[in-house]
Amino acid sequence: MNKAILFSALMLSSMATYAAPPSDALTTCIADNTSGKDRKELARWVFISMAVHPDIQDITNVSDAEREKSNKTMADLLMRLLTESCVTQARATIQQNPNGGLASSFKTLGELAMKELMTNQTVSSSIGGYMKFVDRDKLTSSLTKK
């Protein structure tokens, strides 16, 4: 009886392994092969890229040289991940989903990058700064009324 349970468990676990999409393996590989520094550089690149938006550019001062440096850093990271560190997982992901498989894995990297920044106490305090303007009584009352 115990052998049957063990065999069933092994079959289910191996089926789960094969059932997992290649993009999951790529996501794991990307996470495992990026450092905190890589993730901060990604967050910096996103910030610099968004800084060109007309509604935001008046509060930033990013030079063209800084933008080019950040673009090069991101290109280097992408090339390292997709042509060296995670090439096998990337190929499998593209074969299964050529129209968006890579996007989900890099979305997760973006989330990791944001998490990397959010763990900084100064950033966390700044993000919570709006709470001093929130009417907590009104909010509580509004959300708890039946």
Image: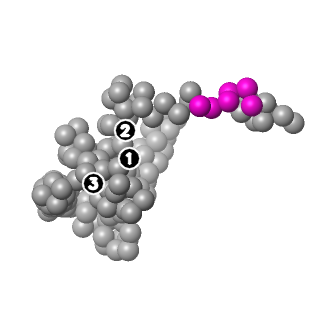
Disc 1/disc 2 C-alpha distance (Å): 6 Å
- Disc 1 crowd rating (10 Å Cα; few below 14, some 14-19, many 20+) is few
| SS for callout 2 | helix
| SS for callout 1 | helix
Closer to us: mark 2 or mark 3? 3
**Quarter in which the C terminus is drawn:** top right
Q: Name the side, left or right, on which 146 lies relative to 100.
A: right
Determine which residue is flagged by label 2.
Answer: 115
Q: Amino acid at mark 1?
A: Glu
Model colouring: one colour
- Quadrant of residue 55 within the rendered picture: bottom left
- Quadrant of residue 131 within the rendered picture: top right
Can residue 19 be seen here? The reply is yes
State the mark number for residue 111: 1
Circles 1 and 2 in contact, beta carbons < 8 Å: yes
Determine which residue is flagged by label 3.
Answer: 48
**Sequence order check, earlier mark of 1 and 3:** 3
Q: Residue at x 78, y 36 (%)?
A: 142
Q: Residue at x 24, y 67 (%)?
A: 91
Q: Amino acid at mark 3?
A: Ile
Q: Which residues are magenta?
A: 133-138
Q: Amino acid at mark 2?
A: Lys
**Sequence order check, earlier mark of 2 and 3:** 3
Q: Residue at x 71, y 33 (%)?
A: 139
Disc 1/disc 3 C-alpha distance (Å): 17 Å
State the mark number for residue 12: none
x then y, percent, for residue 118: 37, 35
Disc 2/disc 3 C-alpha distance (Å): 18 Å
